C-alpha cells in the first residue's frame, strides 16, 4: 500500500502549499530549524501517526525544503493498542517514504 492523501483531504495538499511560514510556526522554533539547516544538523520529527504530528512533518518540509536530507521521521510503537498501534507504525513508515524521509 502506498500512502497518499485520502479522498476526504482533497484540497489539503494545495492548502499546505499555499501557507506562509510566519503564520504557522513560532518564530523561535523557526529560527532553530533554520539554524540547524545552516549547520547541517540532523533533525528528528516525532510522529505518532496522528493529525498533529503528521501536519508538523508536512509543515517543516514545506517551510524548509532544503532540510529534507537532514530530516528523520521518528516513531516508537509501544504496542499499547494492539493492531491499531501496528497500523500507526505502518502509516508513519509509508508517510516517511511518501515525503522522501529516512
Image (cartoon, rainbow, N blue to C red):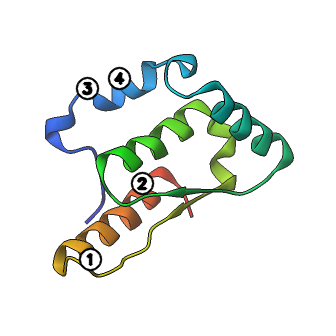
SS at mark 3?
loop
Which is in the foreground here, disc 1 or disc 2? 1
Q: Name the N-terminal-most of marks 2 and 3.
A: 3
Q: Which of the pair 85/11 is nearer the observer? A: 85
Q: How many residues crowd mark 4 within 10 Å: few (<14), some (14–19), many (20+)?
A: few
- Residue 82: x %, y % from top left: 19, 81
- Residue 6: x %, y % from top left: 20, 45
Measuring 37% from the left and 61% from the top, which residue is drawn there?
48
Q: Name the N-terminal-most of marks 1 and 4.
A: 4
Measuring 31% from the left and 70% from the top, which residue is drawn there?
90
C-alpha distance separating marks 1 and 3: 28 Å
Which is in the foreground here, disc 1 or disc 3? 1
Q: How many residues crowd mark 3 within 10 Å: few (<14), some (14–19), many (20+)?
A: few
Q: Which of the pair 37/23 is nearer the observer? A: 23
Q: In this view, does 30 lie to the left or right of 101?
A: right
Displayed quadrant of residue 1: bottom left
Q: Which of the pair 83/18 is nearer the observer? A: 83
- Residue 2: x %, y % from top left: 30, 61
Measuring 79% from the left and 39% from the top, which residue is drawn there?
35
Which is in the foreground here, disc 1 or disc 4? 1
- Discs 3, 4 touching: Cβ within 8 Å: yes
C-alpha distance separating marks 4 and 2: 18 Å
Name, please, the residue furthest toward the right: 39
Q: What residue is disc 2 on?
A: 98
Q: What residue is disc 1 on?
A: 86
Disc number for residue 11: 3
Measuring 77% from the left and 45% from the top, which residue is drawn there?
36
Q: What residue is disc 4 on?
A: 15
91 in relation to 63, above or below: below
Q: Name the N-terminal-most of marks 1 and 3.
A: 3
C-alpha distance separating marks 2 and 3: 18 Å
Amino acid at each position: 500500500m502506498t500512502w497518499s492523501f485520502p479522498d476526504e483531504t482533497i484540497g489539503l495538499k494545495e492548502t499546505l502549499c499555499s501557507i506562509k511560514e510566519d503564520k504557522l510556526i513560532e518564530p523561535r522554533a523557526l529560527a532553530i530549524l533554520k539554524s540547524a539547516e545552516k549547520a547541517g544538523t540532523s533533525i528528528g520529527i516525532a510522529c505518532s501517526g496522528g493529525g498533529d504530528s503528521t501536519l508538523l512533518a508536512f509543515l517543516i518540509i514545506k517551510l524548509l525544503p532544503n532540510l529534507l536530507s537532514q530530516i528523520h521521521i521518528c516513531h516508537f510503537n509501544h504496542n499499547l493498542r494492539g493492531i491499531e498501534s501496528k497500523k500507526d507504525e505502518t502509516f508513519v513508515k509509508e508517510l516517511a517514504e511518501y515525503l522522501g524521509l529516512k
